[in-house]
Image (spheres, coloured by chain):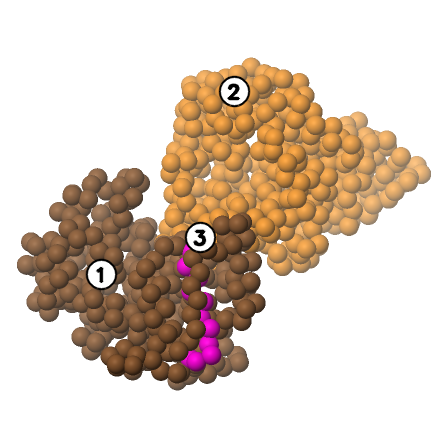
Chain colours: A brown, B orange
Amino acid sequence: MTWTKKDILDIESLSRDEITMLLETASGLKEISERSIKKVPTLRGKTIVLFFMEPSTRTRISFDIAAKRLSADSISISASTSSIVKGETLIDTARNIEAMRPDILVIRHSSAGAPHLIAKHLSVSVVNAGDGMHAHPTQALLDMLSVREVKKEISGLNVAIVGDIAHSRVARSNIIGFSRMGAHVTIAGPPTMIPAGIEALGTTVAASVDAAIENADVIMMLRIQKERQKRFLMPSEREYAVRYGLNKSRLACIRPDALIMHPGPINRGVEIAPEAADGPNSIILEQVTNGVALRMAVFYLLAGGVRNADSD
Amino acid sequence: MRILIKTGRVLDPGKTDLVADMLIIDGKIADIQPPGSQALSQSSVDTEIDATGCIVSPGLIDMHVHLREPGHEYKETIESGIQAAAAGGFTAICCMPNTSPVNDNAQITRYIVDKAASFNAVRVFPVGAISVGLEGAQMAEIGEMKSAGIVAVSDDGRPVVDSLLMRRAIEYAEGTGILVISHCEDPYLSDGAMNEGPFATRLGLSGIPNASESIMVMRDIALSELTGCRVHFAHVSTRESIEAIRAAKQKGIRVSAETAPHYFMLTDNAVAAYDTHAKMNPPLRSEKDRLAVCEALADGTIDVIATDHAPHAMLDKAVEFDLAANGIIGLETALPLALSLVQKGVISMEQLLFKMSANPAGIIGLKSTLDIGESADITIIDPDRVFTYKADSGRSKSRNTPFDGWEFKGCAICTMVNGRIVYRV
């Protein structure tokens, strides 16, 4: 199989074979980060722009490190340093960046669909690093990579995703990704955080957190944002921790081989208790490690892979 | 000046339906006679229009248009707007007050009326604001604006959130002989970018539930019942609103309603690729709602088809979806889209003409007639003319439409205001 896609905009547009190819490429590249000299010349002379219109530490650093490990030149632009603050439109800013001939443009933006808008107007490869509540494909891919490493097969697994599904691009991408790979995805959370028609993405809504996690091979907890209280989504963090958090009492009920995951940054004591985050079932830091390998695979395939002329 | 319209189907719904020749003399309908009648063919005419196979109808009226002047002339001007209206078959339009400055006082009303009159084309009837600056706090000078030429008031684009202000506005306006048009939206519930449902969830866009509209429809029905005063509902899009309006009408409450072509043609799946031409307020709804709108057009619950013509420049639309402006242009596509309902058997041609002429005329207090001696405000419709709609060749200054490139069957081939031809294919 050869890689033919110009962009990675969401999980929905990736086939099962493409997801597998990304995961296998990432597995192969992971070893580079274990070397004492953590750099290969594969993408020497390639330029990757990291265009982050929304605050991010982990994801931006992960992309940056991934680019550098492959010897690509990476440049970061954030909202405050771009001309967007001077009133330039997104398309104009993107066109200006493209005029400097980068090979890949990684974009994070608070508006759903912003990477799609750019990809439509530009010929450069676009990678979505998170757009509003819509998609975070590299996060879902690195989550699948992390699960596959331990469980070998994604197909047939029970995956529970718990928390604010409505506002989570991570949840959407993981529901689509894991279900496309053959897992059974169940979600749980306060009804205020379960969006209308979510079942259509390939998931079932559990009656309670307990019902969702009791038989789960994978438990993914989502970050709860303080500002959600303002939109009346929950009464307080304290109540959330008791009713919906992965706390000590719930930890006692999970399968012994269940994997505990979190896209980070975590709110200790809110959606996840320290005992769960730091315990033997947690692969939260492994997710971060795999993030670099997965993003290396993304760059490798987009910039180094052979692209068919009739693609897209 | 004598114009002879030959062998058209003269159709004034509920009154006249016959194939005939129509003679117009000095702006007035002078005579209607059987085709080839001696009486008409003997008189010399300046212009002869062959209307064989066409419908000669009272001029179409669009009671919901945004002309953008004053203030946003880069999107539309009064001049370009009335040209688009003429091309769409409209002889009269009502323009909403959300200009800059807002049409909330007689001076602005007079500016619009005078400017529109200077083009001597499609008739323009301004709608004034309910509240000063559309801010929902203080009632605008409805009586003064009425003297200057408004036919209705609305804070269109924004709801009147304060129920007391809405109550007082419909009472006061009724006493002035002015209709109140309700933009029904609960702003607390409508903080979103598209219809709430599976499509919004998939796209990661925050949703606007049906209830954001129907709650306000139900409130204003209650206020209409309370006061006994008329209320007209703009751009109705949900089945819950329709059910409420249907029940209110059965109870004898004095409400009327309009919808726009996009609500009977499209659903929220049109947003699929973040197409900002599918972004409007209220948002495109589900298929169930679309079917309810069709049913309400058929059974008379919805009285009027209006365009909600909302011109926006590329600048306002070629941006991130949640930042894009709401609305689409509609003057040049409304009639072909409405005709598609006739072709599908959803409504009859007579119903179409009621909803695009007689009903809006009755609601606002304008004329829609083919009676002899009346002003010749006439639309000639060729129901069989097939064409591909190209937004680029439209008369509107803006191009924001999801119907670009659609193939249509049927359109206006001649629009006449006061016996003056303002558009002809």
Q: Residue at x 63, y 59 (%)?
A: B405
Q: Amino acid at mark 3?
A: Ser
Tag shown at residue A80: 3
Q: Nearer the viewer, mark 1 or mark 3?
A: 3
Decide whether residue A52 is among the magenta residues: yes
Q: Position of residue A249 (x, y in %)?
A: 6, 54
The furthest residue to the bottom: A1
At label 1, counting other C-alpha atoms closer than 10 Å, the crowd grade (few under 14, some 14-19, many 20 or more) is many
Q: Amino acid at mark 1?
A: His
Q: Residue at x 64, y 25 (%)?
A: B150
Q: Which residues are magenta?
A: A43-53
Q: Are marks 2 and 1 in contact (CB under 8 Å)?
A: no
Check disc 1 and report the residue beneath it: A262
Check disc 2 and report the residue beneath it: B139
Q: Residue at x 78, y 32 (%)?
A: B118
A134, above or below B422, in the image: below
Q: Position of residue B1 (x, y in %)?
A: 89, 35
Q: CA distance from mark 2 to mark 1?
A: 53 Å
Q: Amino acid at mark 2?
A: Met
Q: Is residue A130 left or right of residue A208?
A: right
Q: Position of residue B164 (x, y in %)?
A: 42, 20
Task: Please report, as a chain letter, where disc 2 is located.
Answer: B
